[in-house]
Image: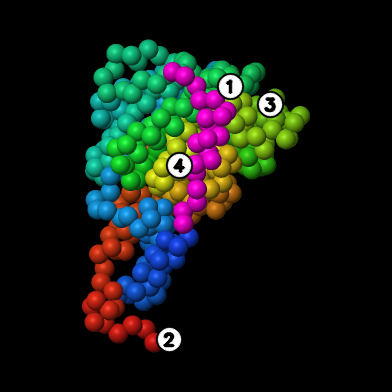
C-alpha cells in the first residue's frame, strides 16, 4: 500500500469546503414553519439543520448508514497501562467477524453496513473472511521511548481512512459512524489530548477499560512521561497535528483521521464515538478546521479526556449514557436520533399546508 504524500494530502484538505450557509438558513426557516411552537424540538432542530446544510437539502429517506471500526495494537501496552492483555485486540476482531460484539448488534439494528478494518493488529489475520485487510504494520512502537510511528507508517494509515471515505462516497453512504478497537489506545488518546488542549495528564487520563487506582496512577505517570519525552522541550510541536499523531498516536487513530478528512471532502456527515475517535476528530479539525461542521458527537463517555475534547471542539453530545466501550457503539446509537430529526424535518406539516394559524408576532 502506497502512503499518501504531503502534496496529495494538501490537495485533499484543499477540497474541504464549509457547508453553504444558505442551506442552514433555509433549514431554519423551514423548521420555524412546522406545526409546533418555535424551537420546541430543541436540539433535534439543530441536528436537522446541520444535516440539511451538509447535504445541501438532500435528505433522501432512508439514510444509507455505515459504521467503520479500525483495529490496531499499541507498543505502549508493554508499560502496563491496560487492564487487558494486548491479545484482546485480536480476539475482539474475531468477535466482530463472528457478529458477537455490541457494535454488531447495534449496526444490525440500525441497518448500518459494518466494516471492520485491520490497520495494525499485532497478529496474522490474513485468513479471516470478512476482515478488510489494510495492515500497515503489526502495531506501533512503544511511545515511552520513541515515536509511535514513522512518518511513512502514519501516512499509510491516513491513506487507509482516506481510501475508505472514497469508497463511502462511491457507495453513496449518507451517514458514517466510526470507532476503534485497540488495547492501550486510551493511553495514546490521553497523550494527544493533553498536547492538543494543554491540559495535564492527570486531567485527561481516565481508567480506560477498568483500571484499579494503583494501575490508573501508573498510567497517568506513563502518559506524563510520554508527553515530556516527545513534547516537553518543544511546545511548538503541539501546533503540528501530524507530529502529535506520529509521536503519540496509533495506526487506527491515524486511519480515523483520514476517514474524517475524506468524509468532509465528500460532504458526508460523520458521527464520533468515544474518547479515541473524538481524539482522531480533534486532530482532523486541527489539520483543517472546516471539518468540524461535518461532525456530530454521538455521545459523551466516562473518560475525562473525552469531555475536554468535546468542549475544545464545541461539540454537544447527542447522548450521555456513561458508556466507555468504544467500537463505534455510541456513534451508532446516535443514528436513530439523527434520523428522527430528519424525518420530523421532512414529514411534519407546515402551518400553511395544515391550515393552522401560526403564533402571533
Please tell me which of labels 4 and 1 falls first in the chain: 1
The residue wearing badge 1 is 151
12 is within the stretch colored magenta = yes
Does dot 1 land on a helix, a strand or a loop? helix
What's the CA distance linking mark 2 and mark 1? 60 Å
Instruction: Tell me residue 204's x, y (percent).
Output: 59, 40
Of discs 3 and 4, which sits in the foreground? 4
* Residue at 25% over, 64% down: 347
Q: Which mark is nearer the camera, 3 or 1?
A: 1
Q: CA distance from mark 2 to mark 3?
A: 59 Å
- Place residue 146 in its image quadrant: top right
**Disc number placed over residue 196 in the picture, else none:** none
Report the residue marked by disc 4.
265
Instruction: Tell which circle, 3 or 4, labels the residue nearer the N-terminal end.
Output: 3
Instruction: Provide the residue designation for mark 3.
Output: 230
Q: Is residue 299 magenta?
A: no
Give the residue pinned by disc 2.
Answer: 361
Q: Name the foreground residue: 46 vs 226.
A: 46
Amino acid at each position: 500500500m502506497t502512503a499518501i504524500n504531503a502534496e496529495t494530502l494538501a490537495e485533499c484538505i484543499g477540497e474541504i469546503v464549509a457547508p453553504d450557509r444558505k442551506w442552514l438558513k433555509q433549514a431554519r426557516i423551514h423548521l420555524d414553519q412546522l406545526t409546533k411552537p418555535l424551537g420546541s424540538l430543541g436540539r433535534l432542530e439543530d441536528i436537522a439543520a446541520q444535516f440539511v446544510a451538509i447535504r445541501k437539502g438532500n435528505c433522501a429517506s432512508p439514510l444509507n448508514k455505515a459504521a467503520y471500526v479500525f483495529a490496531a495494537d499499541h507498543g505502549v501496552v508493554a508499560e502496563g497501562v491496560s487492564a487487558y492483555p494486548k491479545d484482546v485486540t485480536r480476539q475482539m476482531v474475531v468477535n466482530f467477524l463472528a457478529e458477537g460484539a455490541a457494535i454488531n448488534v447495534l449496526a444490525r439494528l440500525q441497518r448500518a453496513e459494518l466494516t471492520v478494518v485491520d490497520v495494525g493488529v499485532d497478529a496474522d489475520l490474513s485468513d479471516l473472511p470478512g476482515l478488510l485487510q489494510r495492515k500497515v504494520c503489526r502495531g506501533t512502537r512503544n511511545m515511552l521511548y520513541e515515536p509511535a510511528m514513522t512518518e511513512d507508517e502514519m501516512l499509510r494509515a491516513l491513506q487507509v481512512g482516506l481510501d475508505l471515505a472514497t469508497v463511502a462516497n462511491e457507495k453513496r453512504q449518507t451517514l458514517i459512524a466510526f470507532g476503534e478497537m485497540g488495547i492501550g489506545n486510551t493511553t495514546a488518546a490521553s497523550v494527544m489530548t493533553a498536547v492538543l488542549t494543554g491540559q495535564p495528564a492527570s486531567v485527561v487520563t481516565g481508567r480506560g477499560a477498568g483500571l484499579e487506582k494503583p494501575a490508573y496512577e501508573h498510567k497517568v505517570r506513563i502518559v506524563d512521561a510520554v508527553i515530556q519525552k516527545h513534547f516537553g522541550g518543544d511546545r511548538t510541536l503541539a501546533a503540528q497535528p501530524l507530529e502529535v499523531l506520529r509521536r503519540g498516536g496509533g495506526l487506527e487513530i491515524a486511519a480515523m483521521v483520514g476517514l474524517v478528512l475524506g468524509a468532509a471532502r465528500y460532504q458526508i456527515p460523520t458521527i464520533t464515538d468515544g474518547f479515541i475517535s473524538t481524539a482522531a476528530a480533534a486532530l482532523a479539525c486541527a489539520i483543517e478546521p472546516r471539518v468540524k461542521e461535518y461532525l456530530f458527537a454521538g455521545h459523551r463517555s466516562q473518560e475525562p479526556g473525552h469531555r475536554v475534547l468535546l468542549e475544545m471542539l464545541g461539540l454537544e453530545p447527542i447522548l450521555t449514557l456513561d458508556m466507555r466501550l468504544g467500537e463505534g457503539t455510541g456513534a451508532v446509537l446516535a443514528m436513530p436520533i439523527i434520523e428522527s430529526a430528519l424525518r420530523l424535518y421532512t414529514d411534519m406539516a407546515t402551518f400553511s399546508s395544515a391550515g393552522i394559524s401560526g403564533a402571533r408576532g
